[in-house]
């Protein structure tokens, strides 16, 4: 049995997230992603992913309050973040920051499921704080203290920009966090499970996931999309002409196609709507319309649907989010899925160790150094 | 197609290492592990793993010299290591140290295969320096500067202990490094490939691998073996009685069984010989004989062969290596295999993304918070 890149291979059971690639359906614990994006909050989704059920009204209030308290990071850790060069790749910085965070978790090595769950929750709470602190340090600014009265999305925007965001901006980021929170055995989540399955710790698993999300074939894709939009804008070329020129030159258009979906990715549907709503509300329709034209051209030329990364680029850009923060924001959200999967993996663990098909040289005798040319 | 833990699933082609689990054979690039352990050096094995061929005589001399020069780490990095708590888990410290090292690699984000290969080589050269520096800092001692005139194994022992080792001790560690350098798609190597396959960078892949090796089901196993030997010694119980008592209590005896080998792991054969030779040379036969009695008891009681971890414990302990360094030493060696696999993955890349079999709740409608109890 084989499949390059494990395509089509089932690696384990999971009760967290179901994806119907034919119908274009995504559900967290049985709840449709569209209903969650319309009515839920990221905080609620975090606890749904962790616990398998929507929290009670009182439970949600208590959980949300606790999560807000856990956003603060130790001052000693902030000092350690100062040692990271300002021009480092934001995801490389986050990889180091989360690894350093582990040294501030006194029970990081505990195998107690309750402790692991607490650390997971703190990771979800802190990742936005780490991302925003690294961002401000990279600009030569001082990190800010979290505001516990704000929701996680609003607080993230505040920590990154220094300004409390509008309700509309906060809700847009909240929805983006909901949409990105989990997606089955994507590469970063799978790497977290591979790490956890040796009975290593939650911090190590999260560090692996960040390093994996970092790649342009995964979390880095929406940055590539906005770079493309900015290039089209600068060149003043028609989006359709740009697509055809790129395809002719054998270049890849980022933000299209998906290993799992055969129809439209439901997250793309939602992000397209958000991108349009932002364009409608500001009157600046450039980024949305350019995206739409690229989408049409790609459907016509290659028959490919856009994926989650495509409209998140124009959405984030319209919200004024710096491009450097696109992939880290993905990490803030996916930390919920990563840690939920680590907890699930550890609840019924089996070492993840596939085989390689050997295609190298056959048996040959060793030649001593002195007998070599 | 499915297999929990991907057991028996072929994840990709590889030309680096072949394992015949039925015959108990392990080969790097076609060369039998026994011949390499007897006649080669770790440095030579590193270049064999990277390049696919044994280097020429002149090439080996130049490569070894370059590798020796690359062992030094920047003073600024040593200062960053001081911020890691002294009592941190040695593999958690190494995870942070390698992630920090990435910020000192100006071309860490390069997609140039030659640059990636250079970074891989520096990682192999530096890992021992990082492990030894962290070890000395944990003891409140100052890290030492590498001695380029020593081989990698001798230099590692010098950096960790402050004393230039005997030729016999250095050769024993050299052989251990050769034996541990690669082993197909073991969990840590596989995690490195999963990370690299999103087109992330070599440092991220190495960081994932360290976090994965950290777990007691993988690199942590030989530490558990020595803890068992020390416990048997302290209790004064007969090794056979200890084994039977543990099995009766449903406890696992570490260092036995392997996902791939159905007969004896050839690395175990070699390490048993090394453990015996050390016992013969010092006259202190306690640790070797205790190990042998446990091995006999396990074969009789469970029909299980010992694996690579079992005799590495008594070997390292007889060499005076602190238990805290057992897993980090594994990382010093396996860094060669990890980076060779990352370079191979990137030479013909495909995103590694398996599927999950969904076993959670079926579709259900979202219930607004206000309608919940």
Image (tube, coloured by chain):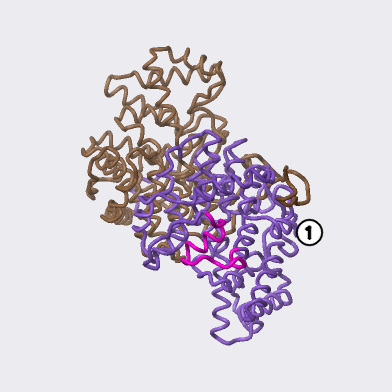
Chain colours: A purple, B brown
- Left-right relation of B166 to B85: left
Q: Which span is picked out in magenta?
A: A149-170
- Left-right relation of B84 to B347: left
Q: Front-most of A298 and A282?
A: A282
Identify which residue is drawn at 41% across, 59% down.
B117
Q: Position of residue B110 (x, y in %)?
A: 44, 65
User: In the displayed structure, would residue B233 be above or below residue A8?
Assistant: above
Q: Position of residue A270 (x, y in %)?
A: 70, 65
Whether residue A360 is visible to the viewer of this picture, yes or no, is: no
Q: Front-most of B303 and A318?
A: A318
**Most common secondary structure along the magenta stretch:** helix
Whether residue B209 is visible to the viewer of this picture, yes or no, is: yes
Secondary structure beneath label 1: loop
Q: Front-most of B31 and A162?
A: A162
Q: Is residue A166 magenta?
A: yes
Q: Is residue B310 magenta?
A: no
Q: Position of residue B144 (x, y in %)?
A: 23, 46
């Amino acid at each position: 049995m084989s499949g390059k890149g494990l395509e089509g291979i089932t690696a384990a059971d999971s009760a967290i997230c179901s994806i119907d690639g034919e119908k274009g359906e995504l559900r967290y614990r049985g709840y449709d992603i569209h209903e969650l994006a319309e009515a839920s909050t990221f905080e609620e989704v975090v606890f749904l992913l962790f616990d398998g059920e929507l929290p009670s009204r009182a439970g949600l209030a208590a959980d949300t309050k606790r999560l807000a308290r856990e956003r603060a990071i130790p001052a000693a850790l902030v000092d350690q973040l100062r040692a990271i060069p300002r021009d480092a790749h934001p995801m490389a910085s986050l990889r180091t920051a989360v690894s350093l965070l582990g040294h501030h978790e006194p029970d990081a090595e505990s195998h107690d499921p309750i402790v692991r769950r607490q650390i997971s929750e703190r990771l979800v709470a802190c990742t936005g704080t780490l991302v925003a602190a690294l961002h401000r340090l990279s600009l030569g600014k001082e990190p800010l203290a979290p505001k516990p009265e704000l929701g996680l999305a609003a607080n993230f925007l505040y920590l990154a920009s220094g300004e409390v965001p509008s309700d509309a901006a906060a809700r847009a980021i909240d929805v983006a966090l909901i949409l990105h929170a989990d997606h089955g055995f994507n590469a970063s989540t799978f790497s977290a499970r591979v790490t956890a399955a040796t009975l290593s710790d939650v911090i190590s698993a999260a560090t692996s996931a960040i390093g994996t999300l970092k790649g342009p074939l995964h979390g880095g894709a929406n940055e590539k999309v906005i770079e493309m939009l900015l290039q089209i804008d600068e060149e003043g070329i028609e989006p359709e002409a740009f697509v055809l020129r790129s395809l002719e030159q054998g270049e890849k258009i980022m933000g299209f196609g998906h290993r799992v979906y055969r129809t439209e990715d439901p997250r793309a549907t939602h992000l397209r709507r958000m991108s349009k709503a932002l364009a409608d509300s500001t009157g600046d329709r450039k980024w949305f319309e350019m995206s739409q034209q690229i989408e049409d051209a790609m459907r016509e030329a290659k028959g490919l649907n856009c994926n989650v990364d495509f409209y998140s680029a124009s959405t984030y850009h319209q919200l004024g989010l710096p491009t450097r923060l696109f992939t880290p924001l993905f990490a803030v959200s996916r930390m919920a899925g990563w840690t939920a999967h680590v907890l699930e993996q550890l609840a019924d663990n089996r070492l993840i160790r596939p085989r390689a098909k050997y295609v190298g040289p056959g048996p040959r005798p060793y030649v001593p150094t002195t007998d070599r040319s």
